[in-house]
């Protein structure tokens, strides 16, 4: 899961004279759906860490942390941000903003529809419920196909193993009452559902709130309107 987290959270930083653009990219540096920005006037401070990460703290209180930055790039980024912040005007927005994938209008909160172009976004709640129904379905809904395939195959293997073991009659010693295999299978199934399905639902919903995932059906409509 650590590898998938790195792939899902891969970002490209673009610094302009007015804002820091945060763009989701894949391993080939191609742009994906999630885009956001932090206005330079909204930045309160920039912190550095021991493990090549930069932490950008907004006046609103929240922070964006970027890891895996080379030492030279980290130093240059901090210096450029410090210089540009001194020469930029105040910002009315003091937090990180998401950008609509249809029209690129800044949106401060996660929503299901763009207030400007009415383009629709995918629901983090729906993604979580789909993963609760069966692991991987929520990530498939969000467009994380590789992760979804991995989770679906893993969940199928786990449930197939549970059903196979459930049909095996447990051995009992002399004088002991053997446990009911059906009860054992039900208890095991409940535990797997709570931990495997429940955990995947929480993680998927969390990933769904990291940005505005566009609905493919509304892309053409919103761009032409």
Image (cartoon, rainbow, N blue to C red):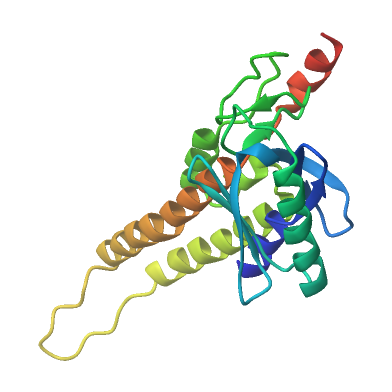
Return the x and y of residue 184 as percentages of the image width and height.
28, 67
Q: Position of residue 199 (x, y in %)?
A: 44, 56
Q: Residue furthest top?
A: 225
Could you tell me which residue is drawn at 69 percent across and 41 percent down? 40
Q: Say which quarter of the image contains residue 51.
A: bottom right
Q: Nearer the viewer, residue 40 or 23?
A: 40
Give the left or right position of residue 224, taking residue 118 as reference: right
Residue 8, horizontal then vertical, whole percent? 69, 55
Nearer-the-camera pick, 168 or 110: 110
Quarter occupied by the N terminus: bottom right
Q: In which image quadrant can residue 175 be found?
A: bottom left
Q: Is residue 19 left or right of residue 137?
A: right
| Position above or below: 142 against 123 | below
Apparent side of residue 175 relative to residue 125 in the rendered image (left or right): left
Residue drawn at the location 28% of the way across and 84% of the way down: 171
Above or below for 66 versus 139: below
């Amino acid at each position: 899961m650590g590898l998938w987290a790195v792939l899902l959270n891969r970002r490209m930083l673009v610094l302009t004279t007015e804002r820091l653009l945060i763009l989701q990219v894949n391993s080939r540096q191609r742009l994906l759906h999630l885009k956001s920005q932090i206005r330079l006037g909204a930045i309160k401070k920039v912190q550095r860490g021991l493990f090549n990460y930069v932490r950008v703290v907004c006046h609103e209180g929240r922070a964006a942390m970027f890891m895996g930055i080379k030492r030279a790039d980290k130093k240059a980024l901090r210096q450029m941000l410090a210089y540009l912040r001194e020469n930029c005007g105040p910002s009315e927005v003091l937090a990180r903003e998401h950008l609509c994938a249809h029209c690129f209008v800044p949106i401060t909160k996660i929503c299901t529809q763009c207030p400007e172009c009415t383009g629709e976004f995918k629901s983090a709640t729906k993604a979580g419920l789909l993963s609760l129904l069966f692991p991987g379905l929520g990530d498939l809904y969000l467009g994380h196909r590789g992760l979804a395939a991995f989770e679906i195959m893993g969940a199928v293997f786990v449930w197939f193993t549970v059903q196979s073991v459930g049909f095996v009659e447990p051995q009992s010693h002399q004088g002991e009452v053997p446990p009911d295999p059906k009860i054992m299978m039900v208890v095991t199934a409940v535990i797997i559902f709570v931990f495997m399905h429940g955990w995947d639902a929480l993680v998927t919903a969390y990933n769904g709130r990291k940005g505005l995932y566009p609905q493919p059906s509304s892309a053409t409509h919103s761009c032409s309107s």
